[in-house]
Amino acid sequence: MRLHALEVTAFGPFADTVRVDFDELGADGLFLLHGRTGAGKTSILDAVAFALYGTVPGARAEGRRLVSDHAAVGAVPQVMLEATIAGRHLRILRSPEYERAKLRGTGTTKEKAKATLTWLDGSGENLSRHEDIGEVVGALLGMSAAQFFQVVLLPQGEFAKFLRADSKERGALLERLFDTTVFGDVEKWFRDRAAAGAKKLAEQQKKVDVLSAKVDASAGIEAGADADPVGWARKLREDAADTRDCTVVRLGDAREAEQTARAALEDAVALARRLERRAAAHADLAELDAAADERAALTAERAAALRAAPVAVTGAESRRAAAAAASALQAAADAAAALTDDEARVLIDDLPEQPQDSDRDRIRPHEQRWSAEVVRLDDLLAQQRRVATLDDERSRLDERRRTLAAELAQLTAQRDALPARRTEAADAVRAAEQAAAALPGLAATRDRTADAVAAANELASRSVELGRREQRVVELRTAHLDARAALLDVRERRIAGMAAELAAELVDGRECAVCGSTDHPAPARPAPGTVTKADEDAAREAEQRADAALTDATAAVTETANVIAALRQRCGDRPVDDLAAERDAAAAAHDAAAAEAGELDRRRAQVATLERLDADLQERLRTTQTEVAEVAQADAVAAAEADEIRARIHAAVGAGGSLVDRRARLAALAAAATELLDRRIAAARARTFADERARDAERAATDAGFDDLEAALAAVRPAARLGEIDALVRTAEEARAVAAATLADPEIATLTGDEMVDVAARQDAATVAAAELHAALAAASEADRRLADIDKYTMRLEQEDAKLAPLRAEQNELAGLADVIAGGGQNSRKMSLRSYVLAARLEEVAEAASERLRRMSGGRYEFVHSDAAGSHGKRGGLGLDIHDEYTGMVRSTKTLSGGESFQASLALALGLADVVAAESGALVLDTMFIDEGFGTLDADALDSVMGVLDELRAGGRVVGVVSHVDEMRQRIPSRLHVVRGRAGSTVEIAS
């Protein structure tokens, strides 16, 4: 990194714009930055840091107020830095967050921080986001802000503090400079693996304990032996097997005793049942003999009932015929009673009291006369219904007349409104035609905004791709520099060994190609590690390959940058959200116009429809007016016909008379006369049939052996009674047969009735035997179940216990490793892995710093790194002491004087800068600042320090020294003077 120019405005103590030309100031490689205390020397370094990283070093960053208090109202604080980093020429412009006066009203408003990065070498995309700029600067420099502040801006007093710090404080700084995250992850990985292993071991042990407890529970005990759960489980299994065998023997004995008792009980029960059957059979026979007379009477009753059954049927028919004759006579009387009209009384008075067959000649003439009158009245009723139809027709015609009047009014209104509708439809057609004409422009706008959104989205991914390719360029540039350095090293070594290479070609008596002598008394010999031409060619090829890869990667970056530039041109480098909003608005406008244009055909059709509607309305008006005239004529015709029919009805029934009532009365008289004739004829015939059936019934009773019909009917029995008698007789016969068969059974016939049997005693014995069998069976089942459970859990216990040993061995090894990596256990130095790595880095720093400290101290002092453990068990590895060549003793850095401490701190800072730079990819740091501390040196010490600084600038670096010591102004001709004033500070360059 080489700084070219710095421009500061309204920043820190600088009210106006000040510019520092580092190319001019650092032309000699060494310049002095001096001024009075508080003038702003350190602010120059802050401005460089702020331009690169957007923050300032140390405690000054916590104040967060970078704007100058001396600046004029409305001045914008900003810092511009132009530099070359990793071969890229760039300019960074940053403005910090600050408060400014509101444009309207009183008070202030906060202005956000801003930043831009411009590539001055013509390749790459310019940046305006803080995050993007930070990523690019970090990638080019290869270090974070904290590392940059320690390596490039060697801070005042920081390394003196580091020099005297204890291991913990020194480790904190080293962790900020050297990334040890991966080693911390390794420590955590081992801790996590050890914890997981311990958990897994505990879970496995828990499984063994649970299974051991289940074995104990299966054996019926609370706890067993903890020393050897597997052996204890096997012993319990043997005991359970012995118990099971004993219960099997007891179960066999109990089963045999239970079978014997059950057989004895079955024999006793069978004998008791045979005795009961014998006694029941004798009792049934005695009961049947006692009821023999009663069964004989029932048999006689059944025989009489069977003879009386046909007589009862004939008697029933006679009774039904008599009842029918009486019912028919009553019906004839009821029919006569219905004829109450005066015209009907003449007919009733002419009839005899009892119905006769001659009644037909008396009733029929009256019925025919009344029926003829009904027919004539029916014709008048039909004409009366025609009047109602005509009235309904006139109502319908009146309704139709009103409907036609409404239609005429509606058609007239439609015809009057039609011109306005035609005008509106024509306007709609013109609007749709205009929308159709605007569609191509709206489509172009929609496509353009959509393309801008697509370009903005692609721009984001291309920007990430550019960052990756630029990072690849940085890596390949570093590789090329390494290959270049290796080539130069090989060339130097070959040149150094060129004498031996030429000496290898010397032959006695032949002239030397260098001096021409033929005598070669002492030719040079190849030294160890001598480089040959083949080695140089291989190094050159490696450098050329690295250069070609770098060229390809740079071309890829340029190509991607060109694509990004094109994308920016397409999207205008505007936010995606704004472009998406414009795209959506353009799409909505296009869709609205397309919808409007899509209505064009329909609206044109609507105009044509309205034109046709005009002619249609004229035709419908004419048709409706004609129909109104026809309705009026039809109404007049219907009214004339209705008046004629009403006149004929009036003539038939008189004023106030009713055709319906007249017709109903005459129809009722005709129907009643017909009903009376039918009923009287039916009554006469029923009386004749009843007399015949009464004579048949009396004759049937005498033929069946009864004195008369009444005696026969008394002997009749219902079917249920006959069935009951049959059932009683049949049951008695069946019971006698069953009793006889029971007594004839060989098992019953051999009994005398005096046999004795004790069923209860046999039952008690069988119950006791069954209980003993059940108990033996339960004991055997329990023993068998317990043995099965013990077998099952013992097998699982053996399997799980076998897994414990390898788990325990693995966990012991893993826990020991985790303990050692964490700095405990067998780790004698008590150093964690992270501390070990930091100790190695500190050792590298001590070696690099010792070289410069020896030069500054005239060979007296050098650093000594110690990895011994601290006192009181504190962890070691970060100890730093001083070896004094004068005394040969190693002593604490706290024993150094003020000037010696400055020399040691400066050497340590430079050594740390070298190590950090190498850690960051061997990036060449062409510019470095050293802040204060030179006032503690005497003249000789100052000469030594200046010699080291001369070595730094001799290597191509530009070193800026920040000091207010007067002697430094005499030693360093190139100076940047920061002048303090009441209105703010300014700068002056002297050379």
Image (cartoon, helix red, strand yellow):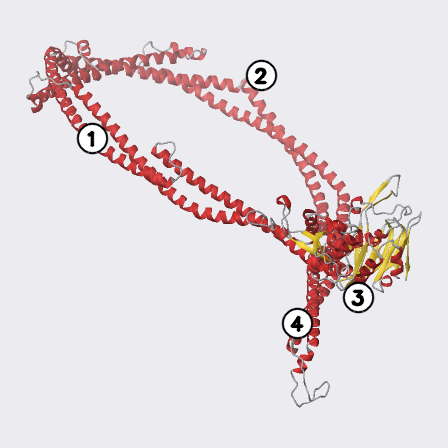
Which residue is the site of mark 1?
255
Whole-angstrom CA distance, mark 1 to mark 4, is: 100 Å
- Whether residue 444 appears in this view of the structure is no
Q: Is residue 341 left or right of residue 943?
A: left
Which residue is the site of mark 3?
954
Name the amino acid type tagged 2: Ala
Q: Position of residue 883 (x, y in %)?
A: 71, 56
Whole-angstrom CA distance, mark 1 to mark 2, is: 119 Å
Name the amino acid type tagged 4: Ala
Whole-angstrom CA distance, mark 2 to mark 3, is: 153 Å
- Whether residue 834 appears in this view of the structure is yes
Q: Position of residue 393 (x, y in %)?
A: 60, 30
Q: Earlier in the sequence, mark 1 or mark 4?
A: 1
Whole-angstrom CA distance, mark 3 to mark 4, is: 28 Å
Between label 1 and label 2, give the one nearer the viewer.
1
Q: Earlier in the sequence, mark 3 or mark 1?
A: 1
Which residue is the site of mark 4?
542
Neighbour tally class for label 1: few under 14, some 14-19, many 20 plus, Cα within 10 Å: some
- Marking on residue 985: none
**Residue at x 59%, y 51% (from the top left corner):** 186
Residue 357 falls in which quadrant of the image?
top left
Q: Residue furthest right?
A: 982
User: In the rendered image of this protein, does residue 260 appear above or below residue 194?
Assistant: above
